Amino acid sequence: MMRLALLTTISLISSLSFAARLKDIASIRGVRENQLIGYGLVVGLKGTGDSNSQFTSKSFARLIEKMGVQIEGRDLQSKNIAAVIVTATLPAFAKAGNPLDITVNSIGDASSLVGGTLLQTPLRAGNDEVFAVAQGALSVIGDGKEVHTTAGRIPNGAMIERDIQADFATRKMYRMTLHNPDFTTAARTVLTINKELGGQYATAKDGGTIDIITPFSYENKGVELMATIEAIEINPDQKARVVINEKTGTIVIGEKVKISKVGLSHGSLTLKVSDDKNKKSKESAEDKVTVLDAGANVGDLVQALNKLGVSPKDLISILQSVKAAGALHGELETM
């Protein structure tokens, strides 16, 4: 009952309009993070490293050879070494010398990376170019209940080696992409930006792409222009949608989901959506009969069924049946 009452609250709150900052519903093309990855070795383990991994021993042999020491691979069978994959996220406008947090994960049969130190590891982007170098002592990852000893982090464990080139401030045009493409939202965004800038500077290429020409007053001031635009508040439109998680019994209801005329019987209860106001006089709590006006939304439906003591599981079945009958106007998504 408590969960169903919560669902009713969600449906009522969702009907309220809200404004979101443009920076929270859109991104600027070309201004994004980049993923980095590298292969490295962790040393200094207390017998918890890879037990008999050929690529671990060969990797360490090549490392030693680069330092001028000739040694046979068979002499490097040590459980104090582990092969790992190192990952990091390179922020937009990254500059050489800035630090990065890194994550380290074992890829062999090492049982623990506790006490280990990552040796110098180049981190590459998708184009195979090196953008950072990582090294340092690991801290294993834990969530307070369980410690994952084969994964670790090194705060500020990598150093950026090269700048991310970008002529951002001098651009003549900027392109923004909506996180959730929608024609109505795009049109509203264009109108609001043009009103803020005092001219026809923004145009929508499609439902998710908006181009902005740099006004003369913002020439060579791209940072100031984007700071002005991203602070603009937009009322994003959304599709009528109901999302159902059958495993947990959770239902999230979007606004504008309407129900047309329909009659439904489920167990001992009967639901009617009708434009006949007089039918309301036939309601009976004992017979579990309820009547809603035609054009009612899903929030009205949840409220009515909540009063009848319908469980979340039954509510899911009812919504699926109403949708199948073509009386629920909106998307019904099941997770």
Image (cartoon, grey):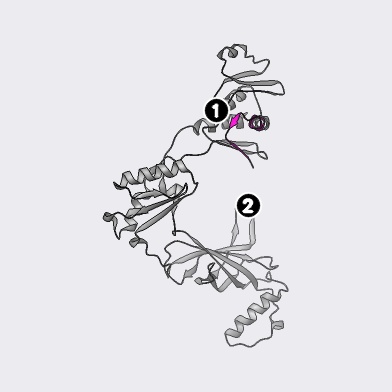
- Specify the amino acid type for callout 1: Asn
Which residue was labeled with disc 1? Answer: 297
State left or right for residue 213 relative to residue 319. Answer: left
Query: Residue 334: within the magenta?
Result: yes
Q: Which residues are magenta?
A: 319-335
Q: Quadrant of residue 73?
A: bottom right
Q: Position of residue 180 (x, y in %)?
A: 50, 46
Q: Most extreme residue toward the left, as rendered?
A: 217
Give residue 32's position: percent from left, percent from top: 46, 59
The front one of 121 and 22 is 22
State the residue in front, 277 or 67: 277
* Secondary structure state at the residue bearing disc 2: loop
Residue 16 numbered tag: none
Query: Mark 2 — residue?
Result: 145
Image location (x, y in percent) of residue 188 = 40, 41
| Residue at 44% in and 57% down | 29
Q: Is residue 127 magenta?
A: no
Circle 1 packing at 10 Å, graded few (<14), some (14-19), many (20+), is many
